[in-house]
Amino acid sequence: MRNAKIHPTAVVEPDARIGVDVEIGPFSVIGPHAVIGERTIVRSHVVIEGEVVIGSSNFIGHGAVIGAPPQDVSFSPERNTGVEIGDDNIIREYCTIHRGSAEGTVTKIGNKNFLMAGAHIGHNCVIGNNVIIANNCLLAGHVRVDDGAFLGGGSTFHQFMHVGRFVMVQGSSAFGKDLPPFVIAAERNSVFGVNVVGLRRAGFSVKDRDEIKMAFKVIYESGLNVGQALEKAATMKFGDAACELFDFVAKAKQRGICPLKRGGAAEEL
């Protein structure tokens, strides 16, 4: 706990591993198995329990709960599960991040993510890097969110679904099927087009953006079913970015992909 700034009302178990220059605010509770990396700031009334490893330079807002048991009726308290959080994340007020459910599993959050107030990350979720999860989003167990995605406030995500890279989700939406990378999604299980603005801001070249638009058309606007569209794509020449979209769709067998809603205002093709 060298150079750590711990408020006298905080409860920090002696076995907790606290890095250099960590700040822990009033009335926070840090369990014995917690590891908190250097320069991380933990505000007031935060609870960190169970096997939780937090990297460096994170910010954890008031009232957040990290490492609580999963909301899974099959969970047994004696299981060894945990949470792993990377570096430079912002986790705002009253976020809840539950630990894994099955023995030896973890809930993972990468680097430079922004979880706004009230977001819930269920057990065994995997969040990539540079993801923004807005206020009151609810992620059920085993949801995967890839790098650069933006999840609008109040949106809900069904267990075991997958959100691809640079997906843009409108607020107050709900999804139970996979969202392929680079799309705009809204309402209930609906895709509206390609996230052109997001791709441009992320530095995708004109060539990559054009190929992604073409790949989108093959999947969604060719009149072919998914299997036929993938067969057609195999006869065409695409770069890595467009191939990422096809690879995602090919692997989305458990839940399938969200369909296109035609004529929506968000469509940018």
Image (spheres, grey):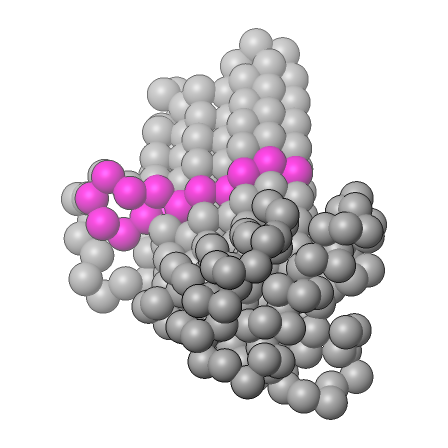
Please report the bounds of the magenta region as a residue range.
Answer: 98-112
Q: Does the magenta stretch include residue 66?
A: no
- Give the image location of residue 53, x and y in percent: 44, 31
Report the residue at 54% width, 38% height from top.
110
Q: Which of 265 and 213 is in front in this view?
A: 213
Q: Nearer the viewer, residue 91 or 32?
A: 91
Find residue 217 and report its image quarter. bottom right
Find residue 87 and report its image quarter. top right
- Give the image location of residue 141, x and y in percent: 37, 61
Locate residue 13 relative to residue 196 in the image: left or right: left
Report the residue at 76% width, 78% height from top.
266
Q: Nearer the viewer, residue 228 or 250?
A: 228
Report the residue at 44% width, 26% height from top.
35
Q: Is residue 110 magenta?
A: yes
Q: Is residue 232 above or below residue 181?
A: below
Report the residue at 36% width, 51% height from top.
124
Q: Is residue 106 visible?
A: yes
* Residue situated furthest top in the rendering: 2
Q: Main secondary structure of the magenta part?
A: loop
Q: In this view, does 189 lie above or below 127?
A: below
Locate residue 258 relative to residue 227 in the image: left or right: right
